[in-house]
Amino acid sequence: MKKQKITKYMSFSEIIEKNPDAMEVLFSKGMHCIGCGMASMENLEQGAMMHGLDPDKLVEEINKSVNEKPKKKSESKKTTKKKRR
């Protein structure tokens, strides 16, 4: 199942809520914004610019990462069960 696409206009809290796997990319870029009070008010574009990052490249990297992440065993079992019905 493809995860919801991340945009640069989403707040950090919205991104993490919809795609928790995005945290890996954000952390790797030094963006530890999840615990910051601005996370609910600032969008990804604003945060990226504050960290000297290109927002469009960051969005591309996050979307690629969360959509290419291998399925967890529990997810693949659910899919298999659905297919058998």
Image (cartoon, helix red, strand yellow):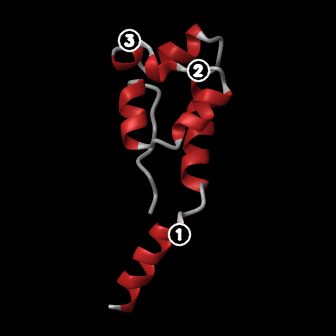
At label 2, counting other C-alpha atoms closer than 10 Å, the crowd grade (few under 14, some 14-19, many 20 or more) is some
The residue under label 1 is: 73
Q: Which residue is mark 2?
A: 31
Is there any visible trace of residue 58 in the rendered image? yes
Q: Earlier in the sequence, mark 1 or mark 3?
A: 3
Determine the secondary structure under disc 2: loop
- Residue extending farthest to the top is 50
Task: Tell me, for residue 37, which label it has, or none.
Answer: 3
Disc 1 from disc 3: Cα separation: 35 Å
Considering only order in the chain, which callout, 2 or 3, is on the residue closer to the N terminus?
Answer: 2
What x and y, as percent, mark residue 57?
Answer: 64, 30
Quarter of the image where the C terminus is located: bottom left
Disc 1 residue crowd, few under 14, some 14–19, many 20+, Cα 10 Å: few
**Vertical relation: 82 (above or below) 26:** below
Residue 3: % across, % down? 44, 52
Could you give the CA–CA distance between mark 3 and mark 2, rounded to whole angstroms? Answer: 13 Å
Q: Quadrant of the N terminus?
A: bottom left
Point out residue 50 in the picture as x, y percentages from the top left corner.
57, 8
Q: Disc 2 to disc 1, how far (Cα)?
A: 29 Å
* Label drawn at residue 35: none
- Residue type indicated by callout 2: Met
